Image (spheres, rainbow, N blue to C red):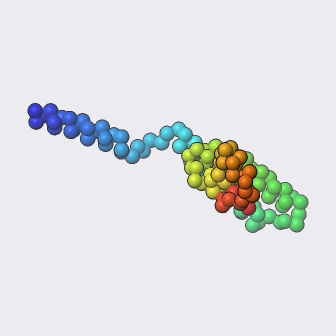
Amino acid sequence: MKKFYILCSLIILVTLSAFFSENADKTLYSFVYSGKIESLRTSQLRLIDIIKNADISSPSGKQKISDQINECRKLLKGVDFWLRYLEPTVYKKINGPLPVEWETEVFEKFEKPYKREGAGFT
């Protein structure tokens, strides 16, 4: 009987350690997510460097800045899906809360819409 309890506790211990151990192998979605975040970060740093070094008075300097801003916007749109579902608090700070139809319908009928913290970039 003692062997049975020892065997059961050993099986439970191994099972729990397998579930709660930190797995070094990244899953595919987290690998893609971290890659997209890193590409957005490097693109933003490149944009900052271009803004610091560009000649704003010339049309070619303005065009370089505009092209880099468009590239950053495209990357941000690509990361938007991942931020929405994997980092919901970060997404809420960037874009504001996700709209809930009944809240908008009920509350904005009786009171003026108010500016929410983190609603957009302004």
The relative height of residue 104 versus residue 113 in the rendered view (above or below) is above
Tell me if 32 is positioned left or right of 22 in this view. Answer: right
Q: Position of residue 114 (x, y in %)?
A: 72, 59
Q: Position of residue 73 (x, y in %)?
A: 73, 50
Residue 79 visible? The answer is no
- Which residue is situated farthest in the left direction here? 1
**Viewer-side residue, 68 vs 76:** 76
The relative height of residue 8 versus residue 76 in the rendered view (above or below) is above
- Which residue is situated farthest in the front direction here? 110
Residue drawn at 77 percent across, 51 percent down: 70
Tell me if 94 is positioned left or right of 54 in this view. Answer: left
Residue drawn at 58 percent across, 53 percent down: 89
Task: State the quadrant of the C terminus.
Answer: bottom right
**Viewer-side residue, 28 vs 5:** 5
The quadrant in which residue 43 appears is: bottom right
Residue 19 visible? The answer is yes
Residue drawn at 31 percent across, 41 percent down: 16
Q: Position of residue 117 (x, y in %)?
A: 66, 61
The quadrant in which residue 24 appears is: top left
Q: Position of residue 87 (x, y in %)?
A: 57, 49
Tell me if 88 is positioned left or right of 60 in this view. Answer: left
Task: State the quadrant of the N terminus.
Answer: top left
